[in-house]
């Protein structure tokens, strides 16, 4: 089971834990940096747009991927998502089918993305790209995989949470970075800064030094009236559950209890029984995220099914500050690869 990210990762100053783990972090960062320099094994006949991040944990990649797919569709293109399928057990490259696949098969993110556009999961991204090439897709949107060199990327958009940025600026396991920012940023075409806060000041300085273009975006709750004034028990197993709890407070919910689970948590009957014990008979509403909800809905287990029937979902949507500028950046960068595709 994935573990919750340690709090010291996000500390603005070094802690004894980060200092003790620093040698391992340096080694991890060097290995990943070296890997990112490797030549790609395969270049797809379709343009590949990678949506990644510098760190592990939630930064808003999935909402951004959904927003970008909608923009591409509105412009007349046919995008398809490619992702690893983290949390799923499916082996090999597969086209996600919501009629037969569950979260435990392909992961929660794949089920969410499949609502918007054809979605494929594959641990081997080259195999996944080759499978997409057999469809009528025109653009591959690769969710994550920024540090993976196997599949050539035409554009890499790096999503950064403005509140947490790059954390303590140290690499795993001493911090949240997958490699030093100064080595990762060389492979990025644009930084997407999500939300507000000073946590990303260091990342912005790196961007300014390298001349990397920065785009702003916000995550907004959809249908906030559904929880306004409600007394709720909020539970979430995502990269940063606190973001969900803060959003619920902002839209008028009264949080009686909050429960944090590890990212991509696989909910059990015991989890469901505990949450239900907190709400039943107390006029409380269980609320969770879309990602969490796909892990409990359509479950054959009785307690999980009962929880799904009672739970309200906090849907969010990414609002990009200047979508026209983003589309111009993409179409200009990909003009040689999209020359024969329709233009919006």
Image (cartoon, grey):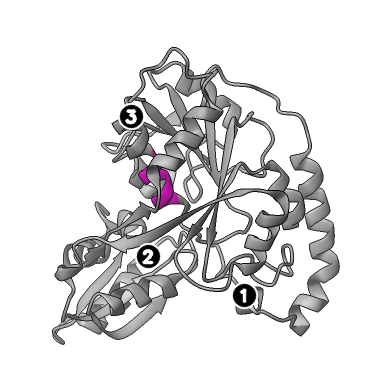
Report the Cα–Cα distance between label 1 and label 3: 38 Å
Q: Are marks 1 and 3 in contact (CB under 8 Å)?
A: no
Q: Are marks 2 and 3 in contact (CB under 8 Å)?
A: no
The circle drawn on residue 113 is none
Other-residue count near label 2 (Cα within 10 Å), few / some / many at <14 / 14–19 / ≥20: some
Q: Name the N-terminal-most of marks 1 and 3.
A: 1
How many numbered circles does the render carry?
3
The circle drawn on residue 268 is 2
Q: Name the N-terminal-most of marks 2 and 1.
A: 1
- Residue sitting at x 81%, y 49%: 31
The stretch of residues the image draws in magenta is 62-68
For marks 1 and 3, give the one nearer the viewer: 3
Report the Cα–Cα distance between label 2 and label 3: 42 Å
In this orientation, does residue 179 appear? Answer: no
- Residue sitting at x 33%, y 29%: 75
Spot occupied by residue 169 in the image (x, y as percentages of width and height): 71, 67
Query: Label 1 belongs to which residue?
Result: 10
Above or below residue 137? Residue 221 is below
The circle drawn on residue 75 is 3
């Amino acid at each position: 089971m994935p573990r919750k990210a340690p709090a010291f990762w996000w500390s603005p100053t070094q802690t004894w834990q980060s200092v003790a783990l620093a040698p391992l972090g340096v080694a991890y960062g060097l290995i990943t940096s070296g890997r990112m320099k490797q030549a790609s094994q395969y270049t797809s006949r379709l343009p590949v747009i990678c949506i990644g991040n510098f760190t592990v944990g939630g930064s808003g990649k999935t909402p951004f991927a959904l927003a970008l797919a909608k923009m591409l569709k509105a412009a007349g293109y046919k995008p398809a998502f490619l992702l690893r399928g983290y949390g799923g057990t499916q082996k090999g490259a597969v086209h996600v089918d919501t009629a037969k696949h569950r979260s435990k098969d392909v992961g929660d993110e794949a089920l969410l993305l499949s609502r918007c556009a054809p979605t494929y999961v594959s641990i081997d991204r080259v195999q996944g790209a080759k499978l997409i090439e057999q469809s009528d897709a025109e653009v591959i949107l690769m969710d994550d995989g920024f540090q993976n060199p196997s599949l050539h990327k035409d554009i890499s958009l790096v999503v950064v949470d403005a509140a947490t940025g790059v954390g303590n600026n140290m690499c795993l396991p001493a911090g949240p970075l997958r490699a030093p920012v100064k080595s990762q940023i060389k492979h990025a075409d644009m930084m997407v800064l999500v939300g507000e806060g000073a946590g990303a000041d260091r990342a912005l300085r790196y961007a300014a030094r390298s001349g990397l273009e920065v785009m702003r975006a916000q995550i907004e709750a959809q249908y906030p009236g559904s929880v306004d004034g409600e007394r709720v028990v909020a539970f979430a197993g995502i990269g940063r559950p606190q973001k969900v709890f803060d959003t619920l407070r902002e839209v008028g919910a009264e949080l009686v209890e909050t429960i944090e689970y590890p990212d991509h948590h696989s909910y059990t009957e015991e989890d469901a029984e505990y949450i239900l014990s907190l709400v039943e008979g107390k006029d409380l509403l269980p609320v969770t995220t879309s990602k969490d909800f796909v892990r409990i809905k359509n479950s054959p287990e009785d307690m999980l099914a009962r929880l799904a029937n009672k739970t309200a979902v906090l849907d969010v949507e990414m609002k990009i500050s200047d979508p026209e500028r983003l589309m111009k950046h993409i179409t200009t960068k990909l003009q040689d690869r999209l020359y024969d595709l329709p233009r919006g």
